[in-house]
Amino acid sequence: MHNPPEDADARRAVAPVICYPNDTLRKPPLDLYRTARDTAQEINRIHIPPREARCFHLSAGSFFRITCTEGPQVGDLNLFEARNLDERFFSGKTRALHGSHLKVGDRLWSCLPYMRPMATIFADTLDWYGQDEHGGRVHDVIGTRCDPYTHHLLSGQDYHHTCHSNLTRALAEYMGRPLSEVEPHVHDVLNVFMCTGFTRDTGQYFMKASPARRGDYIEFFAEIDLLGVLSACPGGDCGSEHSSDTAQCYPLEVTIHAPSAGALDGWYSPSNNRYSRRHAPD
Ligand SMILES: [Zn+2]
């Protein structure tokens, strides 16, 4: 332990600056999306049972809504480019660009070297929640996903329906590939409906019961062709614990809507990041 220097208070008082000022990012055309959504037709509906995950395909320009159909239920979302599992959702850089919790207008960015918007949050019935007295907010990109390895480290128990396990099984089944082959593709998630923050004293990641209720939803616009995988977390509303069969869990539902012809005129699916590797040292 070291004694603070004489100017410790002055060093601590230095004003922070934003790491990634995001005002140069192109704003999503939310008005165009809204107009297109008004005439879009439902084309698919996927039921995700409690403590399970399911895959779904999304064409660029479609809308997908995740709904708590029966009660408060946290969902763990993975996104891939539809034909290339190497291009996946980049939770860490999305957090660096938009903050620890996502809101309407924020993008879900893909990993390097692709780094383009995969989806845009278009509507959210929990947009009223803001920040609570504990510093909690909804829809975080902090938590990685509950997984059986951390659970085993902490408890010595084996549990097979963590979100990591569910996402792996669903992806393996959808791709017709062995679990061991697809498991490394499962990645850090968007925690849909989860209410989380960091404790003031120890800086530890906390969760509290989701404020979502039956009928609440979050909706996204697919910017590129996507393969989505969604797990209904075994923590249920994540008000007490993860990785067990004790929490009350509910199903989730994904509904997919396709826009009518011409509704997105003037909109283009984003291409890969324009940074040119040729100008950089190897
Ligand atoms: Zn989980």
Image (tube, rainbow, N blue to C red):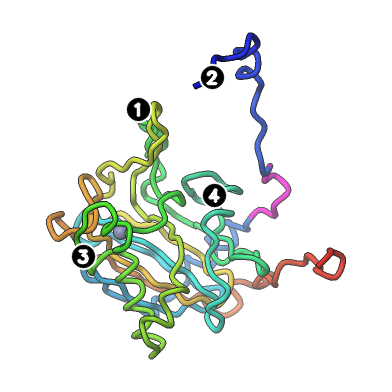
Identity of the amino acid at label 1?
Glu
Which residue reaches farthest bottom?
A: 176
How many C-alpha atoms fall within 10 Å of the one at disc 1: few (<14), some, or many (≥20)? few
Under mark 4, the amino acid is: Arg
| Residue matched to label 4 | 95
Distance from label 4 to label 1 (Cα)?
A: 22 Å
Secondary structure of residue under mark 2: loop
- Horizontal and vertical percent for residue 3? 54, 14
Would you call the spot at circle 4 few (<14 residues within 10 Å), some (14-19), or many (20 or more)?
A: some
- x and y percentages locating residue 21 in the rendered image: 68, 42
Judging by the rendered image, the residue that carries numbered circle 1 is 133
Relative vertical location of residue 128 with respect to residue 257 in this rendering, above or below = above
Dot in front, 4 or 2: 2
Q: Tag 3, which secondary structure?
A: loop
Q: In this view, does 124 lie to the left or right of 117?
A: left
Q: In this view, does 150 lie above or below 10?
A: below
Q: Is mark 1 on a helix, strand or loop?
A: loop
Question: Mark 3 or mark 1: which comes first in sequence?
Answer: 1
| Cβ atoms under marks 4 and 2 closer than 8 Å | no
Q: Do the residues labelled 3 and 4 touch (CB within 8 Å)?
A: no
Sequence-first disc among 2 and 3: 2
Of badges 2 and 3, the one in the foreground is: 2
- Secondary structure of the residue carrying tag 4 is helix
Q: Which mark is residue 2?
A: 2
* Residue depth check, mark 3 versus mark 4: number of the one nearer the observer: 3
Q: Earlier in the sequence, mark 3 or mark 4?
A: 4
CA gap between label 3 and label 1 equals: 35 Å
Callout 3 amino acid: Asp
In this rendering, which labeled residue sits more in front, label 3 or label 1? 3
26 or 282: nearer the viewer: 282
